[in-house]
Image: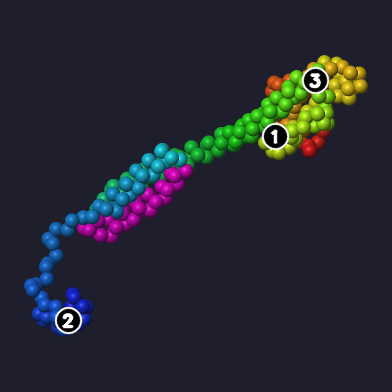
């Protein structure tokens, strides 16, 4: 018995027609003497590798994670070429694609790990820059106040009392501390004696959100100082974070 190639029903071996009406017009074609190998799977792996590289270079390096698709395609092409070498070719091409992808992945992975400290520093720099921008805005408000009055405000309550708009806050949404100062006196003593306040200090508590620690961001009279420099100039009381 054999199956009818038209309807799939059983028919006698050597029969010339079937119940469905199909008729054989000649002997079945024999298999070709030479099989043409298929290179599609190997070419697909190479094409995927090119696409991933181009996407990572043109758009974002995170698209390089799509290299897992290249690895999968290359492994599939290698398995097909191993199981049926007469039908599938391109084993060496697929193997080379796999090696290139794994090597590049290891290199870029190492570079990414090595770049983590830099990313953390850049992130911290962005936070510091945002806080500095807020302090510059605060500075402008204080200068606008000084244009109306003969001196800077004595202290932070005076700032809040005399400046109607909301005061800027640092990146961590904490209040920026203010203190007026003179060469000899500061704070309430200046207010009692009537001496004009000629200097001021702005201070952000920084990432740890505690005033008086090493990561404080300090501006004195519109100029930023390191903590060691600010200690020599500062009159800011060592208070806890707010």
Work out whether mark 1 precedes mark 3 in sequence or the reverse, and give the earlier one.
3
Residue pointed to by mark 3: 149
Q: Please state if 103 lies on the left or on the right of 171 as rendered.
A: left
The answer to which image quadrant residue 60 occupies is top left
Residue under pointer 2 = 20
In the image, residue 177 sits, relative to residue 68, either above or below, namely: above
State the residue in front, 21 or 82: 21
Give me the residue at 32% from left, 57% from top. Answer: 79
**Disc 2, SS:** loop
**Residue 170, numbered circle:** 1
Q: CA distance from mark 3 to mark 2?
A: 107 Å
Q: Quadrant of the C terminus?
A: top right
Q: Quadrant of residue 231?
A: top right
Q: Earlier in the sequence, mark 3 or mark 2?
A: 2
**Mark 3, other Cα within 10 Å: few <14 / some 14–19 / many ≥20:** few
- What number is the disc on residue 180? none
- The residue range painted magenta reads 62-88
CA distance for labels 1 and 3: 26 Å
Q: Quadrant of residue 135?
A: top right
Q: Main secondary structure of the magenta part?
A: helix
Colouring style: rainbow
As measured in the structure, the alpha-carbon distance from the residue carrying label 1 to the one carrying label 2 is: 85 Å
Q: Residue at x 83, y 28 (%)?
A: 158
In the rendered image, residue 42 lying in the magenta stretch gets the answer: no
* Image vertical order of residue 45 relative to residue 191, above or below: below
Q: Position of residue 151 (x, y in %)?
A: 80, 19
* Number of other residues with Cα within 10 Å of mark 1, as a class: few under 14, some 14 to 19, many 20 or more: many
**In this rendering, does residue 9 appear at all?**
yes
Q: Secondary structure at mark 3?
A: loop
């Amino acid at each position: 018995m054999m199956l009818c190639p038209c309807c799939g029903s059983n028919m006698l071996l050597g029969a010339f027609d079937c119940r469905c009406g199909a008729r054989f017009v000649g002997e079945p074609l024999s298999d070709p003497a030479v099989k043409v190998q298929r290179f599609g799977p190997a070419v697909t792996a190479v094409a995927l590798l090119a696409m991933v590289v181009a996407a990572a270079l043109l758009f974002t390096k995170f698209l390089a994670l799509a290299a897992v698709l290249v690895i999968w395609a290359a492994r599939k092409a290698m398995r097909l070429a191993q199981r049926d070498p007469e039908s599938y070719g391109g084993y060496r091409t697929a193997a080379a694609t796999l090696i290139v992808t794994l090597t590049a992945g290891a290199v870029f992975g190492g570079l990414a790990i090595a770049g983590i400290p830099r990313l953390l520093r850049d992130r911290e720099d962005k936070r510091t820059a945002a806080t500095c921008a807020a302090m510059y805005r605060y500075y402008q408000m204080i200068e606008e106040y000084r244009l109306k009055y003969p001196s800077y405000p004595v202290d932070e309550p005076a700032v809040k009392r005399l400046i109607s708009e909301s005061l800027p806050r640092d990146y961590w949404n904490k209040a920026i501390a203010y203190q007026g100062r003179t060469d000899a006196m500061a704070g309430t003593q200046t207010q009692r004696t009537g001496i004009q306040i000629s200097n001021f200090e702005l201070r952000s508590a920084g990432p740890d959100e505690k005033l008086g620690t090493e990561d404080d961001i300090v501006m004195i009279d519109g100029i930023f100082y390191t903590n060691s420099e600010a200690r020599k100039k500062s009159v800011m009381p060592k208070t806890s974070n707010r």
